[in-house]
Image: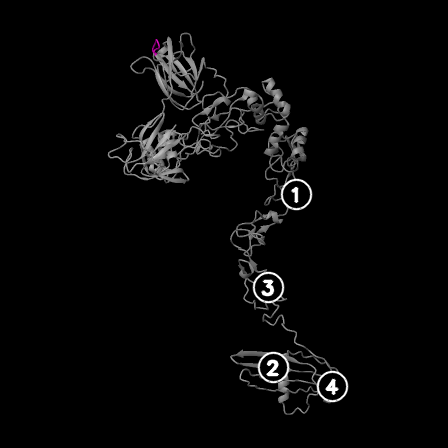
Amino acid sequence: MTYRALFLQPTSMVMMATLLAACPGDDTSATSVSDSDSDTDASTSGDSATTNTTTADSSASADSGSSDGTTTASTTMTTTDTDSGSSSSDTATATDSGSSSDSGSTTDVGPVCGDGVVDAGEDCDGADLGGATCMSEGFDGGRLGCAGDCTLDTTGCNVNCGNGTIEDPEECDGANLNGLDCTSQGFDAGALACSRGCTLDTTGCISFMCGNNAIEGAELCDGTDLGGVDCIGLGYDGGELACDVGCAAYDPSGCTGTNNCCEAQVEGVTGCGDDACEAAVCGIDAYCCDNTWDGICVNEAYALCPTTCITTCGDGLLTGAELCDGADLGGQDCVSQGFASGTLACSGTCDGFDTTACVPFPGPCCQASTVAGCQDQACQDAVCALDPFCCDDTWDGQCANEAATAPACLGFESCPAATCGDGIVSAGEVCDGADLGGATCQTLGYPAPTNNCCFANGGPGCEDGGCEATVCGVDGFCCSNTWDSICAGEAADLCGSLCANTLGCDVDCDGFDASGCSQALPACVEEDIGTATGAAVTAGDTTGEDDDFAQACGGGGSVDHVVHFIATETGTYSFDLLGSGYDTVLSAYTDCGGAELACNDDSLGTLQSTISLDLVDGQAVLLAVSGYSGNTGAWTLNITPPAPAFPAVCDSGVDAISGQPWVVCSADDTGAWISAAAGAGGNYHATQICQSLGYSDFGQFGGTCGNECGYCEPATACDAVGTQTFDGQGDCGIDAGGQVLCDTVTWTCVP
């Protein structure tokens, strides 16, 4: 007979013992106790305590004192109540016993993993997670589980899956596939996706079959399907084109003739027809022989195979080291070069772009620029309402100064007074450090270097033997291969003034330092007067002169005498021919072929000419002395430099930061006296205001007792000043704009 063992939990055994003891037909009693389980429940309240103890004892055997192998059990329960005024105890004992020739005992081992209840030492048990969640475990969401060993299982938790940002351990997140696609996963094509669990989903990827004579997906060709390409289309003379076994490239081994090393081939065609050139290129770029002879390979061929691939600037073909060639700009335009609009052109040497027809973006309202308008519409409108030139022509330094004091500009820019040396061109400055406001040697009238050592010339070598030897001594490529832009840069550094073309800024930021520009005179110049100014700076006679310029005034057809002049300060210069002996014409130009800046025939009721030019310190200009409708004769040139610029009495403005009004009480070359305007009182940034008026800083200061341009006396104003008294009152410390003078104050400006 086969018996099946019955395993019971301790509580089940107690119940069995109780039931067996209650059966009146049982005539067999327990004879021994071999095993016990005990559960104790204790509670205390006030002055009493109750203790309940249950003991279960069980044993089963085929030999237990009963001849028929019956299991005998008995239950004994004892209850004891004790009242001592402070505690009570209840004890119940249940015993299940049996006798056996073999005796064993079982002891309760504590928590049981799998019973659905979190016990001591367990993190969880089944569905009971002990109150834990994915978020309590440091994750952002998901479903927390319990492992078989009653520890928390966080594999269902996630870190922001769905926020578009890949975070460990995510493979992807939404549309963010981390740059992967089906091909990176070993497929030929299709749409890679991201699952809701932020793992890669390749169900949309597909694989093609190379060799079925049908081009599919990324295949370049497949067997007999060449996509309409043949040997001739690849640059060969003829023959039979085939497809490579991997369907990723053509096999031109059956083609006749050679393909051109100087032309890019279609994808899959490798190498070129010149073995030596092919070896040179593929020696530095294996892609050209392993994959495709593309445009990069062609450029390398132009650099490495000068006898095979010859660069010709002006042929309209962008080749070799050329950045552009004629109309071929390599996809570039004014916008890609950092301008707002306009027409980009290629330089005559094909190594750079000509941006003269490009239109820059408007600049900050408190800075001069080369275009009309400024960045803030409200400020622009306010300035242009007073000075239309700023919107119709150019937002120059005067426009920037007007913006610095316009209330409408205060909310957009503080327009602080210029700080020479901070590297930023501000109101009142022509340049500042490396910031030249777009000016170059050429825009200031200095010629560009003409020696071909100074620019990429197609090489090798250049026309100045000494410079060539110096450069090639440090860079042999320039003489053995090509004199490129790198060689030209080395020439600029190593060959002295030969390639001088560097403009600088004066230390006081009110003009340019042109000493680094080429000092060679333009070819049309007949006389250089340098920086001379005054009456009768120079004189001569136009009889027998040549005709260099066709003036826009004076009838034309006259010879001229061209004078080279350099400004030494920024401002308006006056040039005239008063005192000359014939009917003159005077005009001005940027260079020999440059734009005409001004032209005049008669002036001041005479037959002599006068022009005015706004120049900056260091700017060069060409003056053409000519005559009306062919007249010639003796002439005298007079040059008047800019008059010192000082504010006028009662000129006014507002503080660029606080908006408080101020007024000029007096001003000259020795300094100025400034006051809070009548009825005003607030914060004034005296240094900024003084510098905006052309002075270096403020000097003395004090209170006014409410006066304008006076000190504690009645009836004073900018046109009826009182006493200059500076008692040191009104110092309100320093803020981001500098020293602050406050309330009703007055101060001086110093040169």
- Nearer to the camera, 342 or 447: 447
- Nearer to the camera, 665 or 370: 665
Q: Is residue 188 visible?
A: no
Residue 442 image point, x, y percent: 47, 23
Q: Is residue 513 left or right of residue 88?
A: left
Q: For label 4, count other residues whose C-alpha is less than 10 Å away and answer few (under 14), some (14-19) or many (20+).
A: some
Q: How many marks?
A: 4
Q: CA distance from mark 4 to mark 1?
A: 83 Å
Give the number of the mark in front: 4 or 1: 4
Q: Quadrant of residue 5?
A: bottom right
Instruction: Find out whether the residues at labels 4 and 2 contact each other: C-beta distance under 8 Å.
Output: no
Q: How is the image coloured?
A: one colour
User: Label 1 belongs to which residue?
Assistant: 246
Q: For label 1, count other residues whose C-alpha is less than 10 Å away and answer few (under 14), some (14-19) or many (20+).
A: some
The dot on residue 63 is 4
Q: CA distance from mark 3 to mark 2?
A: 35 Å
User: Label 2 belongs to which residue?
Assistant: 53
Mark 1: amino acid: Gly
* Sooner in the amino-acid sequence: mark 4 or mark 1: 4
